[in-house]
Image (spheres, rainbow, N blue to C red):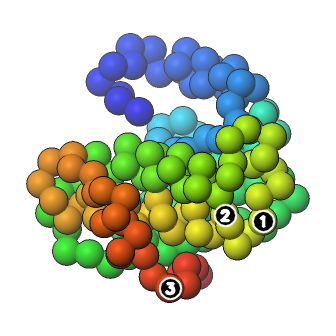
Amino acid sequence: MRLSLIGDLPAYRLRVQRWMRYTDLLKLSDEDIAVLAPGRSHDEAASSWLKAGPRAVVITSGGDGAVLYRNGHPPMPVAAPKVTLADTIGAGDTFTAGLSVALLDQGVSDAAQLAGLPDAAWRQVLQFAATAAALNCTREGANPPTLAEVRAALPAEPREAPE
């Protein structure tokens, strides 16, 4: 979200709610949640949005990783790799691109497939996206890593975020 581009925040929040019925995979940052659902926890906000339409909601929290929410499943936290931070510009966009790449790599080419993706596959998808975003943050400016760079940096086993 770019608050400087939103003239009427209450009206924007209503539009976002209407867009949910057309959304299959929703990715927001913890900063987005603070604006769109002030005073609500990530769990509360994600639960509300899942009821409105998305099959999956991913909330990113910078260096603390990300959490996947799906109906009928407990939240799935995934840790972000620890890196030396140079710049966070482009991290969210890189995470989103990483989600798309990793979902395609898992064979997801249709929104209906999101609901049937097994937990292990989701964990790999989230770890890929978190690793891509973390690598972007090791560089100045929005400078996403290549596919080869992300694959080389992936851990052997996806890491859960600490409770």
Q: Disc 1 marks which amino acid?
A: Pro
Disc 2 residue type? Trp
Distance Cα–Cα, label 2 vs label 1 = 6 Å
Residue 67 drawn at (x, y percent): 59, 62
Q: Position of residue 101 (x, y in %)?
A: 50, 50
- Measured Cα–Cα span from mark 1 to mark 3: 18 Å
Picture coordinates of residue 1, whole percent (x, y): 41, 33
**Residue 156 tag number:** 3
For mark 3, does the 10 Å Cα neighbourhood hold few (<14), some (14 to 19), or many (20 or more) residues?
A: few
Choose mark 2 or mark 3, whichever is in front: 3
Determine the CA span between mark 2 and mark 3.
15 Å
Q: Residue 161: x percent and y percent?
A: 54, 78
Task: Kindly identify which residue carries mark 2.
Answer: 122
Q: Who's the residue at 24% across and 60% down the image?
A: 137
Classify 133 as above or below 104: below
N-term-proximal mark, 2 vs 3:
2
Seen at 35% across and 29% down, the residue is 2
Q: Decide: marks 1, 3 in contact (CB < 8 A)?
A: no
